[in-house]
Amino acid sequence: MKDMLESIAREAKASLELAQSKQELENIRVKYLGKKGELTAVLKQMGKLTPEERPVMGQLANEVRASIEALIEATDEKIKKAELEKKLREEKLDVTMPGKKSELGHKHPLNIVLDEVKDIFLGMGFDIATGPEVEWDYYNFEALNIPKDHPARDTQDTFYITENMLLRTQTSPVQIRVMEQQKPPIRVISPGRVFRSDAVDATHSPLFHQIEGLVVDKGITMGDLKGTLEAFAKRLYGNDTKIRLRPHHFPFTEPSCEIDVTCFKCGGKGCPMCKGEGFIEILGAGMVHPKVLSGCGVDPEVYSGYAFGVGLERLVMFRFDIDDMRLLYENDMRFLGQF
Ligand code: PHE
């Protein structure tokens, strides 16, 4: 029995010296000291010994157990230390290595121009108003003097959520919302997304952006409209820019016009960009229809106003000489990196 105990001690020591991980260590512990372990198996045979031999072997067995336990503890320390060293080695950081360069983004061309437009109008005393993109039929059409059977609805077909709720086709509903909430004098612009069920091509997108403008006060005339938008065009496209008003029709303005600016490319001489016209159309405008004013509780006998709606994509495309609107939405870095 003595031999057995000594060989257990030897074997345990030998395998502990080779142990590399906590798991191996645990396996060794179970193998020698566990309930079904080798040492326990030997101790179970104590009964076969003579009463003289028993205490001697008992003591030896205890010594063997204690020595194995001590060895296990020491090995455990050793393994922990080795693991820590390995971790530190792996996490070593060379602070003298060149860093990874993080690329700085910049504004999207739509936002570059939008911010300029906002600046120009804020500088002229306008506030910024917003409205929902999911809009009631009432605000998008009805209150703008476009009843259910009006042909203007055909050109602004959109995505309906219910019969009375839709994705707004223009920023003009914000005019109504502002007039319902504010008393004149009113001076706001309202930039935002609008939607129409148009197929995508170089000049159309089912989602695009408009900037609405609305001024309501006593004695507002078409002259104010013209002067303000001329100042706007000069600020945006340069001092030599001229504007031209062409008669047009919108149900919610009377009279109505479209406003063109001198072609930034040829300066008005006529070129392929402006199709020989010398001018390029940038917005629709007019004097707010008396029906629209009174519908919002504004007395048209006392107050008058003008409104306009600019297509942001057009401004951006003219400004940066971009010939395909799709480029503005595709997020191609080769395109965006140029701004
Ligand atoms: N909402 C019109 C459109 O989308 C533009 C417009 C706005 C015209 C304001 C007149 C006054 O075509």
Image (cartoon, rainbow, N blue to C red):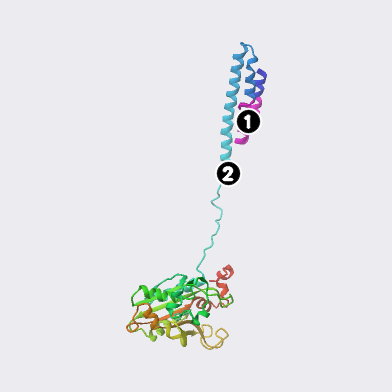
Q: In which quarter of the image is the N terminus?
A: top right
Tell me the magenta residue range. Answer: 10-37
Report the disc number at residue 89: 2
Q: Residue at 58%, 27% (x, y): give it.
A: 69
Residue 296 image point, x, y percent: 37, 77
Label 1, ligand 1: CB separation under 8 Å: no
Residue 16 placement (x, y as % from top left): 63, 30
Q: Which of 193 and 53 is in front in this view?
A: 193
Residue 9 visible in the displayed image: no
> Dot 1 surroundings within 10 Å: few (below 14), some, or many (20 or more)?
many
Q: Does the magenta stretch include residue 329?
A: no
Q: Does residue 38 appear left or right of residue 130 in this picture?
A: right
Residue type highlighted by circle 1: Ile
For residue 29, which quarter of the picture? Answer: top right
Where is residue 278? Give x, y as percent.
52, 87
Judging from the image, what secondary structure is the residue with disc 1 in? helix
Which mark is drawn over residue 117? none
- Amino acid type at circle 2 is Arg
Q: From this view, report whether residue 24 is shown above or below residue 45.
A: below
Residue 50 visible to an observer of this rendering = yes
Q: Residue at the spot x=59%, y=29% of the render?
A: 72
Residues under numbered marks 2 and 1 in contact, where contact means CB atoms less than 8 Å apart: no
Horizontal placement of 185 versus 286: left or right?
Answer: left
Please name the residue that numbered disc 1 is placed on. 28
At 50% from the left edge and 79% from the top edge, which residue is drawn? 153
The residue nearer to you, when weighing 53 against 250, is 250
How far is mark 2 from mark 1, CA to CA?
28 Å
